[in-house]
Image (spheres, rainbow, N blue to C red):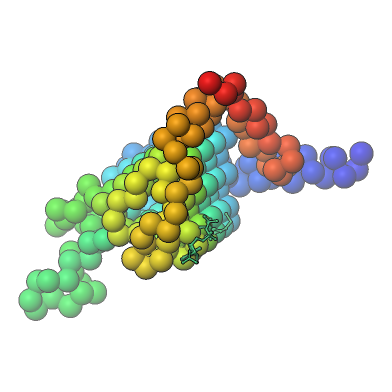
Amino acid sequence: MLSTIKQSLAAGARRLATRLRLARCRAPVRVFGTDLHVGSRPRLWAAERIEIGDHSYLGHEVSIETNCRIGRHVLIANRVALVGRRDHEFRTPGVPVRFGRWVGSVRDPSPFRDDAVVIDDDVWLGFGVVVLSGVHIGRGAIVAAGAVVKNDVPAYSIVGGNPAVEIGRRFASAEEIARHEAMVKGGRFRSSERGFDHFVVVPGPSP
Ligand SMILES: CC(C)(COP(=O)(O)OP(=O)(O)OC[C@H]1O[C@@H](n2cnc3c(N)ncnc32)[C@H](O)[C@@H]1OP(=O)(O)O)[C@@H](O)C(=O)NCCC(=O)NCCS
């Protein structure tokens, strides 16, 4: 009984922490879905917009420092960074990089202000992954721990390394992907701050 009460209080504290962390996000446009989790010490900043879809998870010390559109059911591990590829101008003769035009400048707008990272639904970014702006990570892709992603990632591929290259495929065939997508679409999924054993995981019927 006591442990159930403790568990509920801890879960409530974690829900509140996520809300406070999202409230501290700094971006002119912020769109957040439901059933999100944001771990401790995040940095959430963008020149234009940050969008995070329903049922997605951000681990501890995640840095978002570029525009991004993160889909639904996305799992972002601890210490992942989404960074602006050209957020400091470094090719103007006579200007040290420290003083080069910054992507967030209002006085001196950057041509790269709209650059973004796009992460489709059902993607997993492993521990310490770095994704540069301009990259689109396709639906269902897995990015291995420690990867640096500078190119687009095809749907349902597994990529790793620096620069990230394909190291595998998540499913064996297009039919299996179609079955997975149909079952996810028809299913019910919800996380819980009480832990994984309290998640609702009900895939839809197999076509
Ligand atoms: C990518 C991952 C999911 C493994 O996928 P998998 O399909 O089971 O891959 P395998 O272990 O069979 O490895 C396939 C190849 O990828 C390589 N590989 C695996 N992980 C890698 C990584 N992080 N970086 C580079 N290459 C990697 C393997 O060495 C292997 O190469 P080889 O065939 O030349 O030997 C796993 O390695 C990983 O990175 N998981 C993320 C863990 C994490 O960040 N957890 C945080 C909690 S959210």
- Residue 173 lies, in percent from the top left, at 44, 38
Number of labels in the image equals 0
Front residue of 163 and 192: 163
Q: Residue at x 32, y 53 (%)?
A: 66
On the picture, is 193 further left or further right than 166? right
Q: Residue furthest left?
A: 93
Residue 194's place in the image compared with 148, above or below, is above
- Residue 182 lies, in percent from the top left, at 49, 25
- Residue 50 lies, in percent from the top left, at 37, 43
Instruction: Give the quarter of the figure containing the N terminus.
Output: top right
- Residue 199 lies, in percent from the top left, at 68, 36
Q: Residue at x 51, y 32 (%)?
A: 180
Q: Residue at x 55, y 39 (%)?
A: 36
On the picture, is 131 further left or further right than 183? left
Front residue of 121 and 140: 140
Residue 154's place in the image compared with 131, above or below, is above
Q: Can the viewer see residue 123?
A: no
Q: Can the viewer see residue 93?
A: yes
Specify the quadrant of the image occupied by residue 71: top left
Q: Residue furthest right?
A: 1
Residue 90's place in the image compared with 205, above or below, is below
Residue 196's place in the image compared with 133, above or below, is above
On the picture, is 84 further left or further right than 58? left
Q: Residue at x 74, y 46 (%)?
A: 10
Front residue of 32 and 169: 169
